Amino acid sequence: MKLLVTGTEGYLGCVLGAELLRAGHDVVGVDTGFYKAGWLYSGVDATPRTLVKDIRHLTVDDLAGVDAIVAMAELSNDPLGALAPAVTYEINHGGSVHLARLAKEAGVGRYVYMSSCSVYGVADGVVDETTPVDPQTPYAECKVLVENDLSAMADDDFSPTFLRNATAYGASPRMRFDIVLNNLAGLAWTTKQIAMTSDGTPWRPLVHALDVAKAITCTLAAPREAVHGEVFNVGSSEQNYRVRDIAEIVAATFPGCSVTFGASGGDNRSYRVDFEKISTRLPGFACEWNAQQGAHQLHGVFSSIDMDAETFTGRGHTRLKQLEHLIATKQVDDQLFWRQA
């Protein structure tokens, strides 16, 4: 299958590209290159040929011969959305819908969209794919808008699938330290101390980067009728963790690391996610990783490269810091397009 995958130089896209190539797909990547500074270690055996292009600039000619699209390229978390809300809507909503319209024009049959469990907002109890969404941020609002717009575009020739990922963790050459387990692991390695400011009682669902890649691979391989227009929460019900559990798992994995907790906050609402649908209805999918394994994996990577504190705290592995640097140095304009040298 010929695939066009956006965001191939991102945290998830880096490991996904290698997995899709290993599965025998012909993969063309698209990435604007914001995070080239963030290569942590050599951890993939192949990377796809990648167009250095903003998704807003893609044309129908870029999709010639493509059978399916995996859409991952967006401003990737809530702090980035807060930095530039208007541009977030332009890229995350407008750019993703623009690509879907190009796909329909080019006759691309499948469109796998990376959504997020953040669309549920802050909820009590367990949420599933039938739970009303309640997005709290521009990032989450864009996910809902894209899901709605692409659902309306679905027909006999265009088949979107929406993967609502839990919070990702685990090693990637394009590492991110601005997500919870990875951040705690970095603290444990560089400072030997995890000092939580809250009591850590809220629940958070997690999923390993390689299990996200597996969900995408299974979606592409599934019969069309099994995934057409469907929404899947991506993760496993066993990986709903309290934040304090994540901290204790990481501290136990990194020798000499201590962990402390603060007082209960004024708002300790939390949510757990039900992942039964993906485990029972997406052929071939089951998570292969858990938080303990992910923490051990990260410890091994940090040890192998003798990671220092500067690397952990540097802009290369924190999305907001890197984008702020590109803006401050005027390498990108106020619409986040690269300036010409």
Image (cartoon, rainbow, N blue to C red):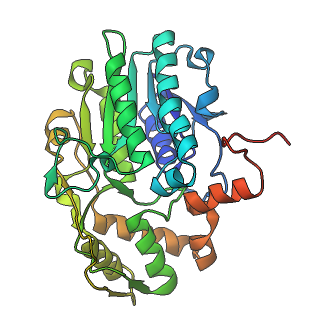
The image quadrant of residue 232 is top left
**Would you place residue 254 above or below residue 295 in this image?**
below
**Would you place residue 38 above or below residue 185 in this image?**
above
**Would you place residue 85 above or below residue 51 in this image?**
below
Q: If the image is split into quadrants, where does the N terminus sit?
A: top left
Q: Residue at x 25, y 81 (%)?
A: 264
The image quadrant of residue 19 is top left
Q: Residue at x 43, y 66 (%)?
A: 182
Q: If the image is split into quadrants, where does the C terminus sit?
A: top right
Task: Provide residue 292's location: percent of width, then percent of height.
Answer: 29, 69
Foreground residue among 193 and 216: 193
**Residue 281 visible, this angle:** yes
Task: Provide residue 127's location: percent of width, then percent of height.
Answer: 17, 49
**Residue 299 visible, this angle:** no
Task: Provide residue 108's location: percent of width, then percent of height.
Answer: 45, 15
- Position of 198 compared to 321: left or right? left
